[in-house]
Image (spheres, rainbow, N blue to C red):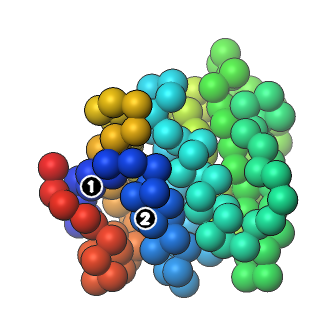
Amino acid sequence: MQAPLQLQWPDESATQAFAQTLARLPELGQAFITLQGDLGAGKTTLARHLLQALGVTGRIKSPTYAIVESYETEAFPIWHFDFYRFNDPQEWEDAGFRDIFASPGLKLVEWPQKAEGLLPQADLEIALQTFNESARQATLHSHTPLGAALLQSLSTLGATGPAA
């Protein structure tokens, strides 16, 4: 797969700009993207900006308590998961999420390690690291041909920003 990309986001507007660029990629509609990082790293913020850029209107809730929030856009369905509250990976299977992951649409997953061993291979992993209250470093890894295509498209569109 393609080498990882490291991006610097000095503030939330840079995160939003990245999300808007990612939202323009046609491949995104079938992607499974994991969002990794400590509490407060910006996973939900990135997801909200991406959902807004994809045309989701109204309040975008964190799926921390509901585990999943679903959205319908003109282009494709979207599921935003947060597995933080899982105590056992088997909870993913018990919740019946296998059918969702087998269906068309974008899947965004926060805390994927809480369902480790049961989730399919992510196309793209976005790992966020906090530098201070507003600055983040994002490291993007592709794990599938679709993920590699997303990274290539981001590079072509100049979404990579300054290297770390």
Q: Check disc 2 and report the residue beneath it.
A: 18
Is 156 on the left-hand or right-hand side of 128? left
Residue in view at x 27 percent, y 66 percent: 160
Side of 123 relative to 104 (left or right): left
Query: Vertical placement of 70 versus 113: above or below?
Result: below
Image quadrant containing the N terminus: bottom left
Check disc 1 and report its element: helix, strand or loop.
strand
Residue at the spot x=53%, y=41% of the render? 43
Residue 108 drawn at (x, y percent): 61, 52
Q: Residue furthest top?
A: 87
Q: Residue at x 28, y 83 (%)?
A: 156
Q: Residues within 10 Å of mark 2 (few under 14, many from 20)?
A: many
Dot 2 falls on a residue whose secondary structure is helix
Q: Which mark is residue 63?
A: none
> Foreground residue, 72 or 142?
72
Residue 47 seen anywhere in this rendered image of the structure: yes
Q: CA distance from mark 1 to mark 2?
A: 10 Å
- Left or right of 127, for residue 50: right
Residue displayed at 73% across by 82% down: 75
In this picture, residue 70 sits left or right of residue 136: right
Residues marked 1 and 2 touching at CB (< 8 Å): yes
Name the residue beneath numbered marker 1.
Answer: 7
Determine whether 101 is above or below 119 in the image.
below
Up/down of 120 relative to 31, above or below:
above
